[in-house]
Image: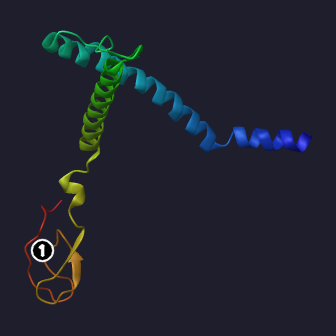
Amino acid sequence: MKNMLGELKEFALKGNLIELAVAFILGLAFSAVVLSLVNDVVLQIIAAIAGQPSFDGLSIDLNNSTIRYGAFLTALINFLLIAFVLFLIVRAVNKLQRPSQETLAPATRNCPFCLTVIPAAATRCSACTSEVAPTEPAR
């Protein structure tokens, strides 16, 4: 029994489990922000244009049954809006994380005369001593 408690403690305190718990809690908080943005801002703009933010009241009566297609339309619109807002957020984050052109520049290149690998900022080849134009500003 003592061994099992030790294993449980080791499992619960592993870095992966803690990171997963933190990610889950942040995901819930992020979900609340996105839902608020969609429900309190975007749907209100739609309400200003279309007249109502929710279509839950739309229904059809058929043989003593009520088909509430409005609730489906509202859920579908919410899904599409949330997907669009998430797309915009992920796109903005990806744009912020994109490496700059300076970090993408190659650190080396080939000498055009002898094809020896030389630093990109070199002005003279170390193997054949030919003068070469630097491909990036010398630092």
Q: In which quarter of the image is residue 39?
A: top left
> Crowdedness of circle 1 by 10 Å Cα count: few (<14), some, many (20+)?
some
Amino acid residing under circle 1: Thr
Q: What element carries label 1?
A: loop
Residue carrying label 1 = 123
Viewer-closest of 121 and 10: 10
Closest to the observer, 29 or 104: 29
Q: Residue 122, percent across and down? A: 16, 72
Q: Residue furthest right?
A: 1
| Residue 102 position by quadrant | bottom left
Q: Position of 123 compared to 70: left or right?
A: left
Residue at (25% x, 68% y) in the render: 107
- As drawn, is 52 to the left or to the right of 9? left
Q: Examine the image and state in which quarter residue 54 appears.
A: top left
Q: Where is residue 30 in the image (x, y as percent from the top left)?
A: 41, 26
- Front-most of residues 48 and 122: 48
Q: Residue at the spot x=42%, y=13% of the render?
A: 64
- 50 above or below 133? above
